[in-house]
Image (spheres, rainbow, N blue to C red):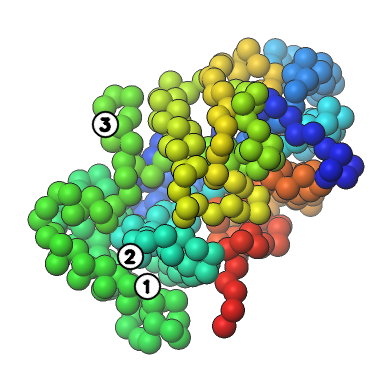
C-alpha cells in the first residue's frame, strides 16, 4: 500500500497497561509497584463491528471458555496478538503505542526541571532536544535509586530543604570535570548552575520552588498528581494521530477505556495540547504534530462495551510484558520478539503508526529493536 493511497482511520480505541499511579509513588528503590513499564496503545479502525467479529473468532478458537479476552487474564498470547494484528490489517487499520520505561521517564523529567530547565524557545529546538536526550541517557545509566528518591520527595513535599537535598544528591552522584568531555560532567555543571539560580531567586519562596519541579495536576480527590506517565503518553499519542490525519481531527473519535481517576486530567491535557497551536516554539516532528488546528472528540467507555478498547487492552498488555521481561534480563521467545517488532513498525507506509519508545538506547536494544531518533531532533552543523 502506498502512503498516498492510505486513508487514516477516524476512530481510535485506547487502553493502557502497567499503570501504577504517578511517578511520585515509585517507592523507595524505584520499585514502581513492580510495574516498571507503562504502555498506552491505540487501535485505529473505523469498522468496530468487523473488529468485534474477528475478536469473537479468535476467542472461540483460542479461549472458548472466556466471555471476553483480557490481557490481565493471560489472553494476550503470541497467537492472539498475531491474529489480532492480521485482523486490524484486513480492516485497513493501524496500531500506535507509547512504551515508557518509568525510570528513564523520571530521568528525563529531572533533566528538564531540576537540572536544565527550558528558559526560551531555543531550548525546544532540535539540537537542544537532542542534547537533553544525551543527558537523560547518562543520568539513567549512572544515577542510583537514592538520587531519584530525593527528587520524588521534593515533588511530594516541596520546600527549600527537600529541593536542596535533591540538588545535593545529584551533585554527589556526578563527578566534577570539563562539561564538554562527558555528559556526566555536564549534568553536574548544569545542576550547579541551576542550584545557584534557585538560591538567587529566593529558595524559601514557594513560587520559586515550583519552578524547579514538574507542574502537578490535581487528582480526582484534590491531591496533586506528579509526573503521570499516562498524561505524557496520551498527549504524544494525540499529536501522532494529528500527524496521521494531516491535521484533520474534526471527525476523529478517540474512545478511551474508562478512567475514573484520570479522565479529567486527560481532558485537560488534550485541551492544553490543542492550545499550543499558536506557539511558535512548537516543533513539527516527523511522527507527531503538536500544531493542532482542529479538535478530536474524546470519550471514555468500559472495555466490556467496546471491542476496540478490548483490542487495545490486549496489545498494550503484550507490549508491556515483553518490554518488562526484556529489561529484567528474561527475554521471551524469538517469536514474541518478532511480534513486538511488528508492533514497532506497523504500517510504515503511514508515518505515525507504530511504536514510540521512551527508554534508553541500551534498553531499546535489549527489547530487540534498533534505536532510532526522530530526524527533527538530530543535531545539525558543527
Which mark sits nearer the N-terminus, 2 or 1? 2
Q: Is residue 346 left or right of residue 169?
A: right
Q: Residues within 10 Å of mark 2 (few under 14, many from 20)?
A: many
Q: As drawn, is 76 to the left or to the right of 214?
A: right
At x 73%, y 47%, the residue is 351
Q: Which secondary structure lies at badge 2?
A: helix
Q: Which residue is mark 1?
A: 187
Q: Residues within 10 Å of mark 3 (few under 14, many from 20)?
A: few
Q: Tell me the quarter of the image containing the C terminus.
A: bottom right
Q: Residue at x 69, y 37 (%)?
A: 245
Residue 115: numbered disc: 2
In the picture shown, does residue 160 fall above or below 297?
Answer: below
Say above or below: 240 vs 87: below
Q: Quarter-wise, where is residue 42 in the image?
A: top right
Residue named by callout 3:
223
For the residues labelled 2 and 1, say whether their Cβ atoms are less than 8 Å apart: yes
Point out the tag, 1 or 3, that comes first from the N-terminus.
1
Amino acid at each position: 500500500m502506498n502512503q498516498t493511497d492510505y486513508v487514516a482511520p477516524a476512530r481510535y480505541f485506547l487502553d493502557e497497561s502497567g499503570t501504577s499511579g504517578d511517578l511520585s509513588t515509585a517507592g523507595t528503590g524505584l520499585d514502581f509497584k513492580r510495574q516498571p513499564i507503562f504502555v498506552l496503545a491505540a487501535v485505529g479502525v473505523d469498522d468496530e463491528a468487523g473488529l468485534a467479529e474477528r475478536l469473537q473468532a479468535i476467542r472461540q478458537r483460542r479461549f472458548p471458555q472466556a466471555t471476553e479476552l483480557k490481557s490481565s487474564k493471560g489472553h494476550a498470547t503470541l497467537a492472539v496478538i498475531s491474529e489480532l494484528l492480521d485482523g486490524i490489517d484486513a480492516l485497513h487499520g493501524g496500531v500506535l503505542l507509547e512504551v515508557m520505561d518509568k525510570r528513564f521517564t523520571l530521568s528525563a523529567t529531572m533533566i528538564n526541571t531540576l537540572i536544565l530547565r527550558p528558559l526560551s524557545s531555543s531550548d525546544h529546538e532540535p539540537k537542544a532536544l537532542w542534547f537533553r536526550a544525551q543527558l537523560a541517557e547518562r543520568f539513567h545509566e549512572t544515577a542510583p535509586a537514592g538520587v531519584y528518591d530525593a527528587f520524588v520527595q521534593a515533588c511530594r513535599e516541596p520546600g527549600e530543604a527537600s529541593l536542596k537535598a535533591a540538588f545535593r544528591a545529584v551533585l554527589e552522584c556526578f563527578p566534577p570535570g570539563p562539561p564538554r568531555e562527558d555528559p556526566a560532567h555536564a549534568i553536574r555543571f548544569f545542576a550547579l548552575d541551576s542550584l545557584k539560580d534557585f538560591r538567587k531567586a529566593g529558595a524559601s519562596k514557594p513560587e520559586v520552588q515550583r519552578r524547579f519541579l514538574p507542574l502537578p495536576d490535581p487528582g480526582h480527590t484534590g491531591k496533586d498528581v506528579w509526573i503521570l506517565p499516562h498524561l505524557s503518553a496520551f498527549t504524544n499519542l494525540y499529536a501522532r494521530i494529528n500527524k496521521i490525519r494531516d491535521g484533520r481531527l474534526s471527525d476523529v473519535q478517540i474512545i478511551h477505556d474508562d478512567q475514573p481517576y484520570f479522565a479529567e486530567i486527560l481532558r485537560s491535557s488534550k485541551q492544553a495540547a490543542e492550545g499550543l497551536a499558536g506557539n511558535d516554539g512548537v516543533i513539527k516532528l516527523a511522527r507527531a504534530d503538536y500544531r493542532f488546528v482542529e479538535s478530536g472528540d474524546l470519550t471514555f467507555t468500559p472495555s466490556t462495551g467496546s471491542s476496540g478498547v478490548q483490542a487495545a487492552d490486549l496489545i498494550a498488555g503484550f507490549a508491556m510484558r515483553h518490554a518488562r521481561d526484556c529489561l529484567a534480563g528474561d527475554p521471551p521467545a524469538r517469536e514474541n520478539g518478532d511480534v513486538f517488532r511488528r508492533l514497532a513498525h506497523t504500517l510504515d507506509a503511514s508515518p505515525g503508526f507504530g511504536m514510540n519508545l521512551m527508554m534508553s538506547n541500551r534498553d531499546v536494544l535489549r527489547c530487540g529493536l534498533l534505536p532510532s531518533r526522530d530526524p527533527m531532533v538530530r543535531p545539525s552543523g558543527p
